[in-house]
Image (spheres, rainbow, N blue to C red):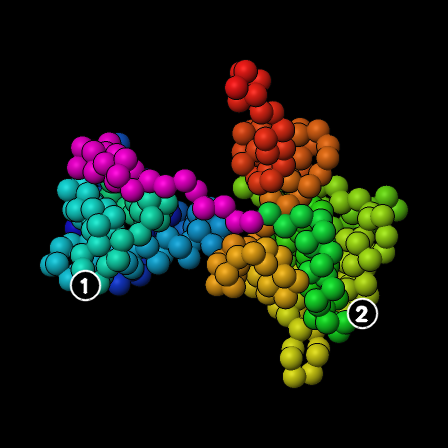
Amino acid sequence: MAQHSSFSQKFPAPARLTGDGGEENVASSPETPPSSAGVARGPLPSSLGGLAETARDYAQRKDSANAARAYASDWRHFAGWCRRRGLDADEPDPQVIGLYLTACAAGDGRHMKPVSVATIERRLAALTARYRSVGRPLDRKDRHIVDVLAGIRRTHARPPRQKEALLADDVLSMLETLPTDLRGLRDRAILLIGFAGGLRRSEIVGLDCGPDQTQDGRGWLEVLPEGLLVRIQGKTGWRVVEVGRGSSERSCPVVALEQWLRFARIEHGPVFRRVLRSSGGVTADRLTDKHVVRLVQKAALAAGVRGDLPEGQRARAFGGHSLRAGLASSAEVDEAAIQRQLGHASAEMTRRYQRRKDRFRVNLTKAAGL
């Protein structure tokens, strides 16, 4: 029988893991089982039922939507692996976890192909979070996990694959490939604001016209004479991004945004929305972050960016981060300003985004006398 965490004891209807990656509600018994600290807790007063429901809602929102989807997929993958081998996925056994990580790294020749170290680490994080959420924490310091993971990293670790940076000239060329209809106006604003603001793809589509307008919004816009203020809830907390006006209307992100909002007749709620192909009408539905990826890839290919690469490789070279990396690589300003704009906690992270900037600016070979 699964043990319950102290959080689950305080808030009724705890969840138990099931083999298909779902959750099964466990009815509360008259006597709540002891907590991990060994202190018995009785049932909550009925007057706190509404507060407990709100607490559960907050707990479910602790991860972003993308992270929650990835973790759920990772759990289903592990549960299926266990089921095919007659193992109990509900039991946080470090030895079983170590074998699973090994199978992820080496493959099993049938159902699994080898995956990257980053994917293995994410799957381990997903399993850890899942077990913790039902009060059965996984001991990640156990040697069956620590030693296997260290060996996998040493054997299979590769340099991170970074998306190509899109510089200002690249973005301007991409704008020329867009249609002049509503969909083109929307995509023009996405590319310019994403580049000038150094925004993540989830931050772009998460924008609202104002504060507290939607449940799933991640920030909002404020248009000023000098430019655009974007308040965003990102990975490192809330930050304010300044997007100044461009040198011409053709390249101005603020003008592009104003045109999209005016012609789409959007004054409240999500900024970037679906446009119906059949009627050309604008829906109330927020775009997903995958639209930004598809837009960047399609426009970069159409504009001939990195035409020296094979077409298949070119498509994979670009993504949502290409806009952020492009700003970091293009802007001739102090590094601290770029770090603040991107919301990075360290200058080292910002330098990782500067794909083409200052390469070989300092030639240590010649400086050393060779």
How many other residues sit within 10 Å of disc 2, few (<14), some (14-19) or many (≥20)?
few
How many other residues sit within 10 Å of disc 1, few (<14), some (14-19) or many (≥20)?
few
Residue at the far left in the pictured view: 86
Name the mark nearer the viewer: 1 or 2: 1
- Give the camera-side residue of 35 and 366: 366
Tag of residue 263: 2
Task: Please state if 236 lies on the left or on the right of 111 as rendered.
Answer: right
Q: Earlier in the sequence, mark 1 or mark 2?
A: 1
Q: Amino acid at mark 2?
A: Phe
Residue at the far right in the pictured view: 225
Q: Which residue is rendered at x = 68% and y = 54% of the image?
A: 170
Task: Please state if 29 lies on the left or on the right of 270 as rendered.
Answer: left
Report which quarter residue 132 is drawn in.
top left
Task: Please state if 58 lies on the left or on the right of 112 as rendered.
Answer: right
Tag 1 and tag 2, C-beta contact below 8 Å: no
Q: Would you say residue 11 sits in the magenta stretch?
A: no
| Residue 282 drawn above or below residue 141 | below
